[in-house]
Image (tube, coloured by chain):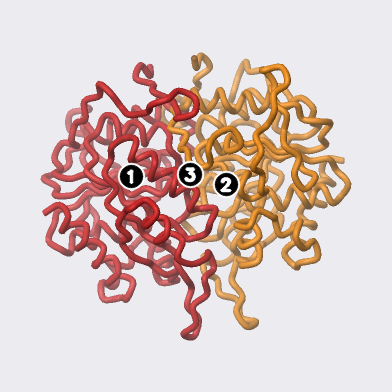
Chain colours: A orange, B red
């Protein structure tokens, strides 16, 4: 079921550089961008949805592949309630919402159903999403990765052509440890890192900034590893409320100051490909 | 390698109730309490360390098993830099810090090394921590669970006697969806849920509370599922700084208002066992 298992770490088994794997592009797409964080709960899915909409606003055709099998957020964040159709019983049609083609395990099961799955089942679901979804002529597919450095990350790195990864983190010390692990994972797996984003950077009250999660940590890690630093996104209640209400802030209000930050990041990323 | 794979979900395979598994208590411990969140980044590890110290302050002997293989936080949060010893090459001695016996994969590898492992390797590490660590006469072992509903959760639920789970979440809608999935997972796997905690409830500036992540959501979910609600813990910079500095707030200042909240929760939980 899981013949290609390559579980290993420096310490226990030596090299983790993938070998003898064929990396296929996701059919119907030009470029695959993974949004990753190593640590959960740093606003990665909120970033992924707003970033995808910002990319679309630059004139690109964009899709989102929600690769978080255990905690899919896409259906709620994008207000999608319909199930993907399959005309031939083998392929799946993505659901278009706000002009973005979307797929998520959350579209295939009841929203409160936990996916109590071991790794090989997760791998199988990820492969289905990468190989059996009828993505229609996309310039970019944005992959919302789950936290961790496990089955999903390995499957993408070994079997799917990932053109670049964006690492999102909050700036507190304990999260940065996961960021360092994430950078080392992508470097090992030969996935180019497009840059790092400092999310939930600070919270502004009456003109004063509160560094709830610390300050400057993500930029420092980017410098340590000689990676691009893509920018800071403050904690913003509008951004959270928009995600909770199923219409990302960029869609609801593209002129919001936070939306402008997403647009800047999207332009930088697009510029590195096209 | 993974003979006991039981990957399944309601929708795809029907029942997930575990069958024919022998649940062994963790040797050297009386009660096992899992700290869980389904979603990452909600402050679960900060909760686990402070809760363990609060339990200790009630006169109990306590250990922490860091079950987060991909993102271990325990070594940093508890300032542990030594490696666990093994006298016989088979067992591991936990490291005692602040009067708490601790084990974590982060103690066995370089702190920036990512554990790029597929599920069966994770399962094997978890079993080692549960069966081969020389826990010394503990009343409670607090297990800091990783996010998700995958290999680690299944291994604990099927093969280890877990006496109860505490579910920690932030109150925003998108996190609550993961909480509902988490509740259903524990119910299915027959692990008693001791209660829910609303973490990062609000942020106070000059006497005014800002509901950065929303309000009252965790308590509502607890009511919906008829589970205990254990309390709210506000966003507190002292709490985060203490975690980043390697000395949990409860250890640093047991009289802090946040420490008092942990003490209340610890008393409630202890009262349900002893």
Q: Which mark is residue B94?
A: none
Element carrying mark 2: loop
- Crowding near pointer 1: few (<14 within 10 Å), some, many (20+)? many
- Crowding near pointer 3: few (<14 within 10 Å), some, many (20+)? some
Whether pointer 3 and pointer 2 mark residues with C-beta atoms closer than 8 Å, the reply is no
Whether pointer 3 and pointer 1 mark residues with C-beta atoms closer than 8 Å, the reply is no
**In the depicted structure, whether residue A221 falls above or below residue A138:** below
Q: Position of residue B96 (x, y in %)?
A: 22, 51
Q: Which residue is mark 2?
A: A37
Determine which quarter of the picture holds residue B195.
Answer: bottom left
Q: Indicate left or right for A239 with B236 as reference.
A: right
Q: Are marks 3 and 2 on the same chain?
A: no
Question: Residue at image x 52%, y 71%?
Answer: B211
Chain under numbered label 2: A
Question: Residue at image x 41%, y 72%?
Answer: B238
Residue B17 versus residue B82: which sits nearer the camera?
A: B17
Q: Which mark is residue B112?
A: 3
* Distance (Cα) linking label 1 and label 2: 20 Å
Chain under numbered label 3: B
Determine which quarter of the picture holds residue B5.
Answer: top left
Q: Which residue is mark 1?
A: B66
């Amino acid at each position: 079921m899981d013949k290609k298992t390559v579980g290993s770490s420096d310490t226990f088994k030596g090299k983790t550089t993938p070998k003898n794997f064929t990396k296929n592009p996701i059919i119907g797409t030009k470029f695959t961008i993974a949004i990753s964080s190593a640590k959960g709960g740093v606003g990665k899915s909120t970033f992924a949805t707003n970033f995808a909409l910002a990319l679309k606003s630059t004139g690109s055709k964009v899709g989102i592949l929600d690769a978080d099998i255990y905690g899919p957020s896409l259906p709620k964040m994008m207000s999608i309630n319909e199930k993907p159709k399959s005309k031939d019983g083998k392929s799946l049609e993505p659901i278009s919402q706000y002009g973005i083609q979307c797929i998520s395990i959350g579209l295939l099961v009841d929203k409160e159903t936990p996916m109590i799955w071991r790794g090989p089942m997760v791998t199988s679901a990820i492969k289905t999403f990468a190989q059996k979804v009828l993505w229609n002529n996309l310039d970019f597919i944005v992959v919302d990765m789950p936290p961790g450095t496990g089955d999903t990350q390995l499957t993408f790195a070994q079997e799917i052509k990932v053109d670049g990864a964006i690492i999102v983190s909050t700036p507190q010390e304990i999260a940065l440890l996961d960021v360092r692990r994430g950078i080392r994972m992508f470097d090992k797996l030969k996935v180019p890192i497009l840059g790092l984003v400092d999310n939930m950077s600070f919270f502004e009250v009456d003109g004063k900034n509160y560094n709830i999660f610390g300050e400057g940590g993500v930029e420092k890690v980017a410098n340590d590893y000689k990676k691009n630093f893509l920018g800071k996104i403050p904690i913003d209640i509008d951004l959270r409320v928009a995600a909770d209400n199923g219409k990302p802030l960029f869609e609801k209000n593209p002129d919001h100051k936070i939306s402008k930050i997403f647009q800047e990041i999207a332009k930088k990323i697009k510029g590195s490909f096209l």
